[in-house]
Amino acid sequence: MKTLSDVLQAAKESPCLRVSVAVAEDAEVLQSVASAVREDIAQFLLFGNKERIREIAEQECISLEGAEIVNTRDPMRACRDAVASVNKGDADVVMKGMVSTRDILKSVLDKDVGLRSGKVLSHVAVFDMPRYDRFIFLSDAAMNIAPTLDQKIQIIENCAQVCRALGVMRPKVACVAAVETVNMDMQATVEAALLSKMAERGQIRGIDIDGPLGLDNAVSIEAAKHKGITGNVAGNADVLLVPDIESGNILYKSMVYFAGARVGGMIAGAKAPIIVTSRADTHESRLYSIALACVTAYHTYNQGIMRRLIHT
């Protein structure tokens, strides 16, 4: 897979998974649900105020075919029940509706019904860039504010999981920073060098990691050659590991608004993918995020999903 259109196609060709939506009474959410059903990507469990969901669907002429509504008037209960449905195996992916990310994650981390895996949760964005013949994966632009070295290792592993679901079996990870040399006053460069050495020694397996690398010599072979930087990753990075949420968020939005990139995203690291789209996301981006989560779920948790499909 090289484009998000390929991801859509892969989702169509895979078994139709079920997505549980927490607090579904929102026109944009329901439009995304209807599009995903129409594209044969997923079926849905909609948790929320049943009357309000039906009212919005009627007002906006949105079909609710392929979606089952579970009447839950309290938003926090809707979050908890949506997450619990995935925990119980009634659904495969959880999606945030008209609720804050903080509230849906509170249910995801609930000890009784949540989707804890013992790993760090991190956001993975997948960009389809006009100038590149491959995906550019970005992490973490939305979850971890200032990740530690240990957290960065888990962020890389979460991102690698999504990479492999899309066919990038040995991802090349660039630990991006402001400079390409280790500077003891710049912690990002020190940790980038440590991560690179850990991968070289096999402490992080199945992933090529290099850094510190500037953004230019991470994605441009010409820029890497100009600065005399060699190696598997330089100029050929699949994954951009950013040092903190601020640089990640700015880079994410720059790629969308300046570079015209198409994007899908999800939270990885839990027992199932979590879709947390923004109000500013386009309808197209929401659909890509649903497809991305479903493809990742199928390739990562295939055994459990197949058991549910056989049972139903």
Image (cartoon, helix red, strand yellow):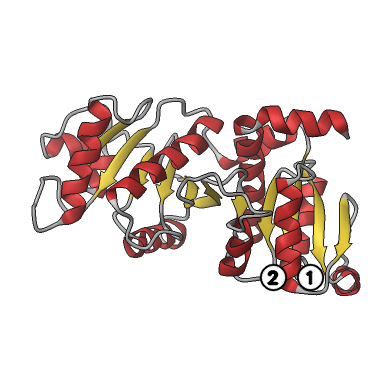
**Residue at mark 1:** 25
At which x and y percent is residue 45? 82, 54
CA separation, marks 2 and 1? 7 Å
- Of callouts 2 and 1, which one flags the residue occurring earlier in the amino acid sequence? 1
Q: Are marks 2 and 1 in contact (CB under 8 Å)?
A: yes
Q: Which mark is residue 98?
A: 2
- Observer able to see residue 23: no
Q: Does 308 sit left or right of 234 as displayed? A: right
Q: Amino acid at mark 1?
A: Glu
At which x and y percent is residue 257? 45, 62
Q: Amino acid at mark 2?
A: Met
Element carrying mark 2: loop
Query: What residue is rendered at 23% in x and 25% in y?
Result: 201
Query: What residue is rendered at 68% in x and 47% in y?
Result: 93
Q: Quadrant of the C terminus?
A: top right
Q: Nearer the viewer, residue 295 or 4?
A: 295
180 above or below 47?
A: above
Query: What residue is rendered at 70% in x and 55% in y?
Result: 83
Q: How crowded is the residue under tag 2: few (<14 C-alpha within 10 Å), some, or many (20+)? A: some
Element carrying mark 1: loop
Quadrant in the picture for residue 82: bottom right
- Observer able to see residue 199: yes
266 above or below 165?
A: below
